[in-house]
Each structure stands twice: as structure tokens, then as C-alpha cells.
Amino acid sequence: MEHEIDYRPSFALLTVHLNADERLTTEAGSMVSHTPGLDVETSARGGILGSLKRSVLGGESFFQNTYTASEPGHITLAPPLPGDIVRHDIADETLLVQSGSFLAAGDTVELDTKFGGGRSFFGGEGLFLLKLTGTGPTFLASYGAVHEVELEADEQYVVDTGHIVAFEESTSFDVKRVGGLKSTLFSGEGLVCEFTGPGKLWLQSRSQDAFLAWLIPQLPTDTSNGQ
């Protein structure tokens, strides 16, 4: 499955070339364009319960689109946020992906949802991950540029959960709060993920949560009713 990625790292556009009878599963709403001869089937992959898990817990669409090429052609895809796209092929292994970073994969790749732990003392925040297993190409999207980190055996690395794109299951990880109560409340950080190698991590240079934390206080409020 050949591909190109243009306009990276800020406004990446993915082009995937499909041979006849080749299939690609994509996140709903990610298609930009395609050549004639591509048939699309929209379905709840993994059944109703599996799709509910991905939607409610994993932050992905309930439905996904599978494109099948009846003749050679291509499809272009883009994520909703400005950023980069990276390809990683898995071979009978597991890749864990942060919510919102899945863009597309070969139809031989299975998607599930996994709770990564780390619920805060407020009871609501935790790290939910998509679990990609099988063999085939996967395409991941980031908010901002992608930064790749390779960990040696027993090497440790700490990442803010808002900057995680994906990581290989060979890495062990532990989700925890930053320091004590004071640090969690006032440091500007929330949950961090402490990884231990060996394995590869993909990080994004921007955080959607951090952007929203900056943006929301700047939005105008309605003062016409005196409130």
C-alpha cells in the first residue's frame, strides 16, 4: 500500500494508493477526496458494543468507513486538527493510540479500546487508548508535529498525557499525577505517563487540552442579560 504525505508538519494531507480489491478503513469524516472506482461501506466495526467502547471511551467515531478499490486509485485523508501524519506498519503486534490520533489502517488491523489507568482523585479523568492489533499499515495523526522517541531496555521517559500520539505495547507504562495535590492543581500539568523501554513512542508537539485551556477564557461572554 503506497502513500505520500504532503504539507507536513502543520497541515498534513495523506494520499493512499489502492490496488484493485485493496481495502482501507478510515475514521469517519477524514476523507478529503478520492478517484472513481472506490466503494465505501460505513459500519460499526466490532459490533455495537465494540463501536460504543471506541466512541464513548476512546473518543473515536461510532461508525467507520471502509473503502474498497474496484480499480486502482487513491484516496486523500486529513485529520480535523492542524498537524502531522505518520505511518507505522504493525506485524502481528499491538500499537496503543491516544484518543483522536487514529486516522486510517488496513482492514486487517483490528481496533479495540483499552483503559490505560490514571483516574485522578476527581474521579473523571483517565487515559483511554485505542488498541490496534494484527498486521498491516496504520496511519496516525497529531496536533502539531510528530516527535519520535526510541527507548532502550529499562530506559524511562515521562510524557504529559496530552502529548501522546501512540506507543508500542512492548513499552510498559504507568499513569500518575504530577507531584502532590498542589502540583496537580497549580502546575498547569495534569496526568503524566511514565514509560519504560524497550519500545517506540510518538509524541505531538502541541496539546489540544492546553490549547482549550488557553482559548476558553479568551472567548467573549454574553453580558446582555446582566450575567
Image: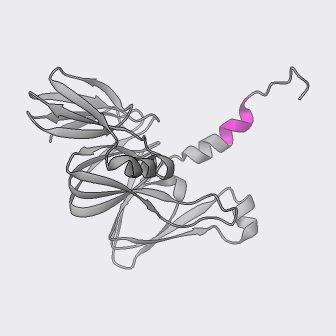
What is the x, y in percent for residue 68?
17, 33
Relative to 198, is 163 on the left or the right? right
In the foreground, 79 or 39: 39
Q: Quadrant of residue 227?
A: top right
Location of the N terminus (image quadrant): top left
What is the x, y in percent for residue 36?
17, 20
In the foreground, 196 or 108: 108
Q: Is residue 194 above or below residue 114?
A: below
Magenta-span inclusion, residue 217? yes
- Residue at 64% across / 64% down in the picture? 120
Residue 121 shows up from this direction: yes
In the foreground, 2 or 49: 49
Relative to 211, is 19 on the left or the right? left
Magenta-span inclusion, residue 43? no
What is the x, y in percent for residue 215?
66, 36
Q: Is residue 69 above or below residue 97?
A: above
Farthest front residue in view: 48
Which stretch did the figure color magenta? Answer: 214-219
Task: Give the number of marks.
Answer: 0
- Residue at 74% across / 68% down in the picture? 181
What is the x, y in percent for residue 90?
23, 57
Q: Quadrant of residue 70?
A: top left
Question: What type of secondary structure mainly makes up the magenta span?
Answer: helix
Residue 202 shows up from this direction: no
In the foreground, 134 or 13: 134
Q: Quadrant of residue 72?
A: top left
Farthest bottom residue in view: 154
